[in-house]
Image (spheres, rainbow, N blue to C red):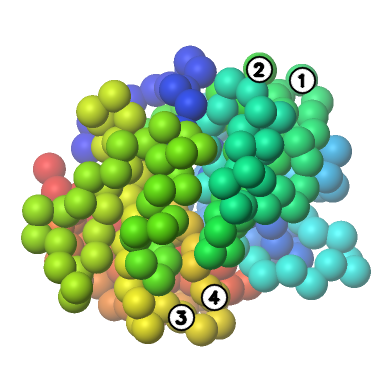
Amino acid sequence: MTEASEATRRPPGTPCWVSLMVHSLGSTEEFYTDLFGWEYEPGPGQLGPYVRAMLDGREVAGIGEMPPDRHLPVAWTTYLATDDADATAESIRSCGGTVAVGPLDAGIAGRMAICSDPLGAIFGIWQAQTHMGTRLHGLPGTPVWNELITQDTTAVGKFYEHVFGHEGQAHPEASEEFDHLTLRLQGRPVAAVHGVGRSLPHDRGPHWMTYFEVADADEAAARVELLGGSVLQPPHEGPGGRLATVADPEGAVFTIIRTAP
C-alpha cells in the first residue's frame, strides 16, 4: 500500500484511533515493538500509565495500563471521530447504546468516551484537539481497517447509521450465509459490519476488530507465536489480501493483513 500521513481532523464517524488497555504495559510494548517495530512516547496520563506507539515519528496507536485491581477483558478499541463528544454520547444513549466512561478530557489532546452499541460491542468516540489520531497509514505496523463482528448487521447497522451518519451498503454477494455491510461516509468506505450469527465467539461477544498491515502475513503470524502470542485463524486469502487472526500474550485479538496491491 501507499504511505499516507494524516494530520487533520477526521470527518465524524470515521475510525481515527485504536487503543489497547493491558495489565503489563512494559511486556506489551516489547511484544508490539518486536512485531511491528513500534517506538513509544508518553501520552495523556489522566487514566493511568499510557503511551503512544510511533512509527517514523508519527502516532499509530495507543497502549495503556489498567489499575492493578481492574480485571477487564484486554482488547483493542476502535475510536470513531466526532466534532462533539457530549452530543454524540447523548445520541448513543438515545439510540439504545451505553456510555460507560466519559465524556472526559484527555488533557489538551481531546475529549473522549468509551461506549457500547445496543448489542454490546465496545468502541470509543474521539473529539480531537491537539491529537488528531493515527497519523500514518499503509505501512507495516499501521492500522488499515476496522470491522465490527456481531450477530447480524440489520439492527446494529441502523444504530451506527443514526448516530454517525454512516450509509450502510450491503455486500453484492450478501446472503443468509454471508451477512456483510460496508459503512460509508460521503461515498467512501470507512468500516464494515460482519454478521456471523451463531459463529460469534461466546467468550468475546460482539466486538470491533482492528486490522494491522504487515509485509508478510505468514511470517507475521509465525512471529506472533514466537513472541508468546497465539494464532486463532491461520493465514489465508481474503477479499482484501492475505490475513490471519491472532492474539497478543495478554489475549488482545487483532487481524494482520498483507493487503492486495
Q: Residue at x 76, y 36 (%)?
A: 103
Distance between the alpha carbons at the discs numbered 4 and 2: 33 Å
The residue identified by callout 2 is 130
Q: Which mark is residue 201?
A: 3
Q: Which residue is mark 1?
A: 108
The one of 224 and 105 positioned closer to us in this rendering:
105
Q: Secondary structure under badge 1? A: loop
4 or 1: tag closer to the N-terminus: 1
Residue 46 % position (x, y)? 85, 38
Q: Amino acid at mark 3?
A: Pro
Residues at marks 4 and 3 touching, judged by CB atoms closer than 8 Å: yes
Q: Quadrant where the N terminus lies?
A: top left
Q: Amino acid at mark 2?
A: Thr
Q: Is residue 50 left or right of residue 127?
A: right
Instruction: Please tell me which residue is depicted at 23% across the width and 28% down the height of the picture.
Output: 187
Res 227 visible: no
Are the two marked residues, 1 and 2, in contact with CB atoms closer than 8 angstroms? yes
- Quadrant location, the C terminus: top left
Q: Which mark is residue 204?
A: 4
Spatial separation of the CA atoms under disc 4 and disc 3 = 5 Å
Image marks 1 and 3: residues in contact by CB distance under 8 Å: no
Where is residue 147? Give x, y as percent.
38, 54
